[in-house]
Amino acid sequence: MSLSGAHRAAFRREAAGEGRVYAIRDDGGLAAPSVGAVWAVPFWSKPTRAGRVVDQVAAYRGFEVFAVDVDEWLEDWLPRFEVDGMLVGVNWAGARATGYDLTPAQVRQWFEDEPAESGNSSARA
């Protein structure tokens, strides 16, 4: 399993255990980089994972880590992302913030105990 694949698997396990997910924001709002016309909003399963990206990726320096309750995230946030055609990044890591980008439907499927099998690995900063 690739490192990105391991981070993806950890996301599902840890987010359920924590009961929350973590995002980063600054005065302009949530981090939501794009490649072409596709936007992805990254989330992490632990605040330390999100904090490492803030510390390591120049584009995210000055961002703050904040928690979102998993139920609120699943019921309110993901449907909005789906309507807007956005992807969900899970546990991006490293100096280039690489990881999996999944559709909101794929992420919801994880929490219904039917793991999604595909995602697009990409680098975003």
Image: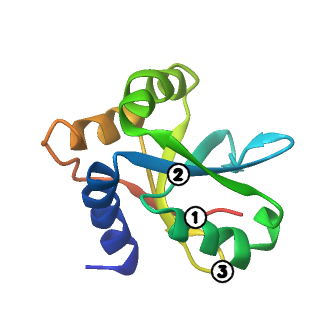
Which one is earlier in the sequence, the residue at label 3 or at label 1?
1
Comparing marks 3 and 2, which lies closer to the viewer? 2
The amino acid pointed to by label 2 is Tyr
| Circle 3 residue | 95
In percent of the image, x 58 and y 64: which residue is there? 50
Residue 56 is situated, as x and y percent measured from the top left of the image, at: 70, 79
Q: Horizontal placement of 30 versus 81: left or right?
A: right
- Residue type, label 1: Ala
Which residue is tagged 2? 22
Q: Residue at x 53, y 51 (%)?
A: 22
* Precedes in sequence: disc 3 or disc 2: 2
Q: Specify the quadrant of the image occupied by residue 78.
A: top left
At 32% across and 70% down in the image, what residue appears?
Answer: 5
Contact, CB < 8 Å: mark 2 with mark 1?
yes
Check disc 1 and report the residue beneath it: 50
Q: Quadrant of residue 110?
A: top left
